[in-house]
Amino acid sequence: MPKCLDCDADINLKADVETGEIVDCPDCGTEFEVRSLEPVKLDHAPQEEEDWGE
Ligand SMILES: [Zn+2]
């Protein structure tokens, strides 16, 4: 079972989860992207920044 990179809570993945899917931590709400399966690797989901940096 993968753990949240931020708060170490267990993250439940659906049985049919696919690579690239976005899951969120039930504890802190941080979104993660499923980078690989077997073994499951999560990484922070790309954030849509409000700052457009003009
Ligand atoms: Zn968390």
Image (tube, helix red, strand yellow):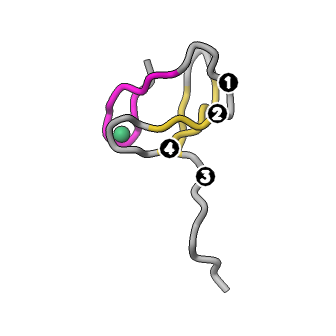
Q: Position of residue 46 (x, y in %)?
A: 60, 52
**Which three-letter amino acid code belongs to the residue tagged 4?**
Glu
Mark 4 surroundings: few (<14), some (14-19) or many (≥20) residues within 10 A: some
Distance of label 2 from label 3 (alpha carbons): 12 Å
Distance of label 1 from label 4 (alpha carbons): 15 Å
Question: Does the CB distance between marks 1 and 4 fall below 8 Å?
Answer: no
Residue farthest toward the bottom in the current orientation of the protein: 54
Mark 1 near ligand 1 (CB under 8 Å)? no
Between 7 and 29, the one lying in front of the other is 29
Q: Name the image quarter holding the C terminus.
A: bottom right
Q: Name the image quarter holding the N terminus.
A: top left
Q: Position of residue 32 (x, y in %)?
A: 53, 40
Of callouts 4 and 3, the N-terminal one: 4
Q: Give me the residue at 43% from left, 45% from top.
A: 30
Q: Which residue in the protein does label 4 denote? A: 31
Quadrant location, ligand no. 1? top left
Q: Give me the residue at 40% from left, 28% from top.
A: 3
Question: Does the CB distance between marks 2 and 1 fall below 8 Å?
Answer: yes
Say which quarter of the image contains residue 14. top right
Between 51 and 40, the one lying in front of the other is 51
Of callouts 2 and 4, the N-terminal one: 2
Mark 1 surroundings: few (<14), some (14-19) or many (≥20) residues within 10 A: some
**Which three-letter amino acid code belongs to the residue tagged 2?**
Glu
Mark 2 surroundings: few (<14), some (14-19) or many (≥20) residues within 10 A: some
Mark 3 surroundings: few (<14), some (14-19) or many (≥20) residues within 10 A: few
Distance of label 2 from label 4 (alpha carbons): 10 Å
Of callouts 2 and 3, the N-terminal one: 2
Q: Which residue in the protein does label 2 denote? A: 21
Q: Which residue in the protein does label 3 denote? A: 46
Q: Which residue in the protein does label 1 denote? A: 18
Which stretch appears magenta? 3-13
Q: Is residue 48 magenta?
A: no
